[in-house]
């Protein structure tokens, strides 16, 4: 190579090394070649196309639009040879060498032709084409050598720029992934996670429309969840899916593959692939489609759909992988928030149901309270009404019994005695009912006075004496405290009588009943103990419940203890018991020595 040529090479190296745009480098290259081969009519660079043809990209100042020129190696053996050998070739005379496309040779009247491949990493990047428009170029060896050196130098620079751009891309992608992780870690609700996912997915894919469908494993269906789209509103998208499209993996081969194989699938032209759902593609104008599974805990719970609307788009493996990475990152966060929000919704739903049930119950309780009040009023008025005629009958019986109206024979007296006892029992029960009704409706009033307790106990003991005698039961009064304290005398006697008569009722013949009283802190404590049948453990908790009877074989109303409890509590005291089935019971109650404000 001549010194002059080295200088030119050096000049060109200086220029192209300061350029970062491949188009500029190619322009410098063709101009340098044109200035070296001045006899050439066309110096052009032809860029390799994805279909294997070469399209005019840039040239020296030409009267023709080079970008309209396409060289097809299939029709041009000369180019095919260069592509296969990756080496430059020269046809000094096209009349003797017929390899080049005859159509072009004729059209442009080409006499001589030089072709040099621009190779980058063993791949053809493009071709430099140099020829005349009718006058042979008669290239010297020096010219060809220098031109080849220009092209090689440009190839190296293009390779460097490409490598630089690749590294730059790689860094950009890594940064995007890092940004996605950061943004996801700050997204707490489903809404925020979706926003982040859509934002980064759009950045990664360059797509404007992204939809997410949730997968129901049991029903094998996909339902539209959310979209970010410039073509369709979310409500319209959902509506169309609900009315026209049924996404079931058993009838949709594309979704089936994505879900079962857990892999992303890109389809550049949906209508030339048998798998997509044509109905859905037609409805939304989808031409290309990228589907990416959303996988959490090893299971697909949704699919990200990235369609190209009214335009086609193909994705490189690298781009698909990148979108899949973003989808994987979003999937874990999305599945967590969806799960949490579902739980939240269930709790909200249950709370509403509970509130409604409570509302109904409140109504029922009010109704029951009202009915209960009615019942108590009824019991009160009925017992009141019953008491008058019973008292009248009792009075008449007494007159007869006292023989005021004439003597009675022994049989008549016996009958009268039986009738009297029955009437007394009836009167007691009616009185109990009346007390109960009054207590329940809060219309009960105590009449307090200072009363000697021993007198009250004595009086009660006298009343039960005949009953005890009848069953030959022994009564032991351990202590009968002579102490005065405030009480409603009649009611306290009623309580002691109730306890004593229960002890009598539920203790077999010859049993023993023990009564005791003592002072305990600020109260008088009274105890009635028997060695009778006792109360079964499982029934003890109901003993103070109104109308409850543990042994229904005995007569009575089941009200005595319920009333006693309320009366004792109205006095400010309390009542309780201990009992063992088959061994006996101890009932105790307290009465405060002084009336407190609470009472
Ligand atoms: P009644 O005596 O009218 O049935 P009470 O309210 O006085 O109603 O008593 C409720 C139930 O408690 C009784 O039916 C009985 O089963 C049980 N009970 C009460 N006192 C005794 C006792 N001393 N021994 C065994 N069971 C008793």
Image (cartoon, rainbow, N blue to C red):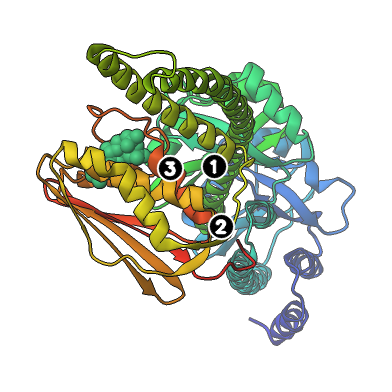
Secondary structure at badge 1 equals helix
**Marks 1, 3: nearer the viewer:** 3
Describe residue 158's horizontal placement relative to residue 262 as left or right: right
Q: Quadrant of the N terminus?
A: bottom right
Secondary structure at badge 2 equals helix
Q: Which residue is tagged 1?
A: 346
**Marks 2, 1: nearer the viewer:** 1
447 above or below 454? Answer: above
- For label 3, count other residues whose C-alpha is less than 10 Å away and answer few (under 14), some (14-19) or many (20+): some
**How many callouts does the rendering have?**
3
Disc assigned to residue 562: 3
Residues under numbered marks 2 and 1 in contact, where contact means CB atoms less than 8 Å apart? no
Camera sees residue 579? no
How far apart in space, not on screen, are marks 1 and 3 (Cα)? 44 Å
Q: Quadrant of the C terminus?
A: bottom right
Ligand 1 closer than 8 Å to label 3 CB: yes
Ligand 1 closer than 8 Å to label 2 CB: no
How far apart in space, not on screen, are marks 2 and 1 (Cα)? 30 Å
Depth order, front residue of 522/545: 522
- For label 2, count other residues whose C-alpha is less than 10 Å away and answer few (under 14), some (14-19) or many (20+): many
- For label 1, count other residues whose C-alpha is less than 10 Å away and answer few (under 14), some (14-19) or many (20+): few
Q: Position of residue 328 (x, y in %)?
A: 50, 55
Q: Position of residue 591 (x, y in %)?
A: 46, 63
Describe residue 414's horizontal placement relative to residue 319 as left or right: left
**Of callouts 2 and 1, which one flags the residue occurring earlier in the amino acid sequence?**
2
**Marks 2, 3: nearer the viewer:** 3
Q: Which residue is tagged 2?
A: 326
**Of callouts 1 and 3, which one flags the residue occurring earlier in the amino acid sequence?**
1
Q: Position of residue 267 (x, y in %)?
A: 55, 35
Give the quarter of the image for residue 479. bottom left
């Amino acid at each position: 190579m001549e010194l002059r040529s080295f200088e030119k090479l050096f000049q060109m190296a200086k220029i192209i090394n300061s350029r970062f745009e491949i188009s500029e480098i190619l322009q410098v290259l063709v101009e340098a070649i044109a200035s070296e081969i001045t006899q050439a009519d066309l110096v052009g660079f032809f860029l390799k196309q994805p279909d294997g043809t070469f399209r005019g990209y840039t040239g020296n100042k030409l009267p023709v639009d080079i970008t309209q020129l396409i060289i097809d190696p299939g029709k041009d053996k000369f180019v095919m040879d260069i592509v296969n050998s990756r080496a430059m070739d020269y046809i000094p005379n096209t009349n003797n060498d017929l390899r080049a496309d005859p159509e072009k040779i004729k059209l442009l009247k080409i006499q001589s032709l030089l072709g040099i491949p621009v190779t980058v990493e063993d791949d053809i990047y493009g071709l430099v084409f140099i020829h005349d428009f009718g006058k042979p170029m008669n290239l010297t060896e020096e010219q060809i050598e220098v031109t080849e050196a220009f092209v090689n130098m440009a190839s190296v620079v293009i390779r460097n720029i490409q490598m630089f751009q690749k590294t730059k891309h790689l860094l950009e992608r890594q940064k995007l992934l890092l940004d996605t992780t950061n943004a996801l870690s700050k997204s707490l609700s489903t809404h925020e996670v979706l926003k982040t996912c859509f934002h980064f997915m759009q950045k990664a894919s360059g797509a404007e429309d992204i939809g997410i469908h949730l997968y129901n494993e049991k029903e094998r269906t996909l339902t539209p969840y959310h979209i970010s789209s410039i073509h369709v509103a979310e409500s319209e998208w959902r509506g169309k899916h609900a009315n026209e499209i049924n996404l079931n993996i058993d009838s949709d081969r594309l979704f089936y593959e994505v879900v079962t194989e857990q892999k992303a699938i890109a389809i550049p032209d949906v209508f030339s692939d048998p798998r997509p759902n044509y109905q859905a593609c037609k409805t939304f104008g989808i031409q290309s489609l990228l589907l990416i599974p959303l996988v959490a805990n090893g299971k697909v719970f949704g699919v990200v759909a990235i369609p190209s609307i009214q335009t086609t788009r193909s994705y490189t493996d690298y781009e698909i992988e990148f979108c899949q990475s973003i989808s994987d990152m979003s999937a874990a966060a999305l599945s967590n928030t969806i799960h949490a929000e579902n739980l939240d919704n269930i709790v909200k739903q249950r709370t509403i149901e509970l509130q409604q049930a409570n509302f109904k119950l409140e109504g029922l309780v009010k109704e029951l309270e009202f009915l209960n009040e009615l019942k108590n009023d009824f019991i009160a008025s009925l017992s009141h009404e019953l008491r008058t005629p019973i008292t009248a009958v009792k009075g008449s019986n007494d007159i007869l019994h006292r023989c005021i109206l004439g003597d009675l024979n022994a049989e008549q007296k016996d009958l009268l005695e039986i009738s009297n006892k029955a009437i007394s029992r009836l009167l007691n029960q009616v009185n109990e009912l009346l007390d109960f009704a009054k207590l329940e409706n809060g219309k009960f009033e105590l009449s307090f006075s200072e009363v000697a307790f021993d007198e009250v106990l004595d009086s009660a003991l006298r009343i039960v004496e005949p009953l005890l005698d009848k069953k030959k039961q022994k009564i032991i009064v351990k202590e009968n405290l002579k102490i005065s304290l405030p009480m409603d005398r009649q009611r306290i006697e009623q309580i002691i009588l109730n306890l004593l008569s229960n002890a009598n009722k539920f203790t077999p013949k010859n049993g023993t009943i023990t009564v005791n009283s003592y002072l305990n802190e600020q109260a008088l404590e009274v105890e009635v103990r028997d060695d009778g049948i006792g109360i079964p453990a499982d029934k003890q908790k109901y003993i103070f419940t109104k109308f409850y009877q543990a042994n229904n074989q005995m007569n009575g109303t089941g009200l005595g203890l319920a009333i006693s409890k309320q009366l004792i509590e109205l006095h400010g005291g309390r009542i309780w018991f201990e009992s063992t089935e088959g061994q006996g019971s101890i009932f105790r109650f307290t009465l405060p020595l002084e009336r407190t404000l609470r009472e």
